Amino acid sequence: MASSHAVVIGGGIVGAACAHALAREGMAVTLLESAFVGGGTTAAGMGHLVVMDDSEEQLALTALSLQLWEELADALPGACEWDPCGTLWLAEDVQQLEAVRRKQELYARAGVSTEILDSAALLEAEPMLRPGLAGALLVPGDRILYPPGAARFFAEEAQRSGALFREGVAVREIRAGEVVLANGERVRGDLVVNAAGAAAPALMPGLPIVPRKGHLAITDRYPGFCRHQLVELGYLTSAHVMSSESVAFNVQPRRTGQLLIGSSRELVGWDGRTNRAVLGAMLRRAVDFLPRLSELAVTRVWTGFRPATADKLPLIGPWEEVPGLWIAAGHEGLGITTAPATARILADLILDRTPPIDPRPYLPGRVQAQAASPYEATP
Ligand SMILES: Cc1cc2nc3c(=O)[nH]c(=O)nc-3n(C[C@H](O)[C@H](O)[C@H](O)COP(=O)(O)OP(=O)(O)OC[C@H]3O[C@@H](n4cnc5c(N)ncnc54)[C@H](O)[C@@H]3O)c2cc1C
């Protein structure tokens, strides 16, 4: 397998990380990107590298990925804006503080260290928060980076290992052993990896990944306004429930001094227009936690589409019906975090090695029966 040629479709952070992992193993890799590397949802994301515990499987994947990011940290160029700021999960009342304690136990079982802050310690850590919050869980190992910079880093590292990346090249069709580009050109590959994010189903009709829209707002520069990524404890509920609309408080201090304000979730297909009602609710939620945020200037608002699966886990592994076809897609709101772990699992499976965590929960086989297969081997 190490001497095989892999074609990776999609130069978002997931495809770029996969191209990097495969090229480092000595495989010939071609990365095909319809626009530019680090665009797509990757350009719309927040860049919070976060251990998340919506399920045991999500916890295992995110914890592994944080370790892999840490191993890469020294190699990341300045453009990645690496920031070891940690996360504070905010508890509004005593019930939520109980939930913080349960969260701490879960994290401890996954080997992730945390610390519980009481109300006073929280205000000392983040004086701009509204007084009276019950406390928080500090996860010091969480990180922040600039996602487009990180995607480009992976693509350039892949290139250094011999990979070819082609931008402005759209794949029109996947066949067994090759892909067909929009201009009719055929690119052969012993294996093909569909890493086209929320657009992955366009190449594999029936693949159960849907775009889940999110808004972000960014402020002008206010260095020191807050120091950690701040997330309300209810964020997980907002991310978990596949309701048509939800918002949760999630604010990130960028190295530039800007504040990124999130987050929202909507199921409205590919409608990328700003939804004023949702944006308003998101900003009000943010001001509720950080009252002085209302005095700051928001300079830009945008939307992006998380590639969502029904069980909130990505699809990583072979698509059994088509020889040589692999998937690395469906990372919803955690693709920046989990790109390195995804790439590691994919490479290990391709090379018939044992991944560091059980890969079975992420295998595409779990959704395969739901998807129609319009593919046939190339004559
Ligand atoms: C508002 C918001 C906030 C987020 N915040 C975070 C966060 O803080 N932390 C985190 O971990 N995650 C976050 N995410 C999620 C994260 O951004 C995504 O999970 C991740 O970017 C998905 O990466 P990807 O490479 O799978 O997809 P993409 O980045 O979309 O990349 C897919 C690429 O494939 C290309 N492509 C598509 N079709 C074709 C084709 N036919 N041929 C060739 N190329 C094609 C596209 O142009 C695109 O560049 C957030 C997402 C949103 C929307």
Image: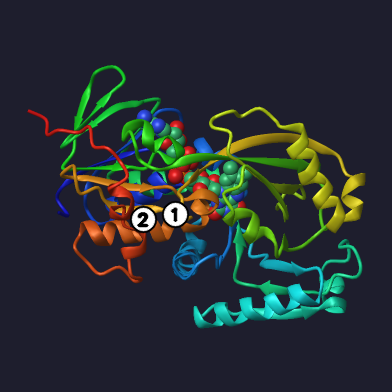
Residue where numbered disc 2 is placed:
343
Label ID, residue 226: none
In the depicted structure, whether residue 269 falls above or below residue 122:
above
Horizontal arrangement in the rendering, residue 20 relative to residue 261 (left or right): left
Q: Which of 85 and 76 is in front in this view?
A: 85
Tags 2 and 1 in contact by the CB under 8 Å rule?
A: yes
- Residue 43, given in percent of the width and then of the height, sits at 56, 39
Q: Residue at x 58, y 39 (%)?
A: 267
Image quadrant where residue 139 sits: bottom right
**In the displayed image of the protein, which residue is found farthest to the top?**
183
Q: Is residue 335 above or below residue 341?
A: above
Figure disc tally: 2
Question: What amino acid is at disc 1?
Answer: Ala
Residue 145 visible in the snapshot? no
Q: In this view, does 191 lie to the left or right of 333?
A: left
343 on left or right of 112: left
Residue 348 placement: quadrant: bottom left
Secondary-structure class at tag 2:
helix
Most foreground residue, 294 or 95? 95
Q: Which mark is residue 339?
A: 1
Q: Crowding at label 1, few (<14), some or many (≥20) Cα neighbours within 10 Å?
A: many
User: Is 201 rendered above or below residue 13?
Assistant: above
Figure quadrant of the N terminus: bottom left
- Residue 218 locus on image (x, y percent): 74, 42
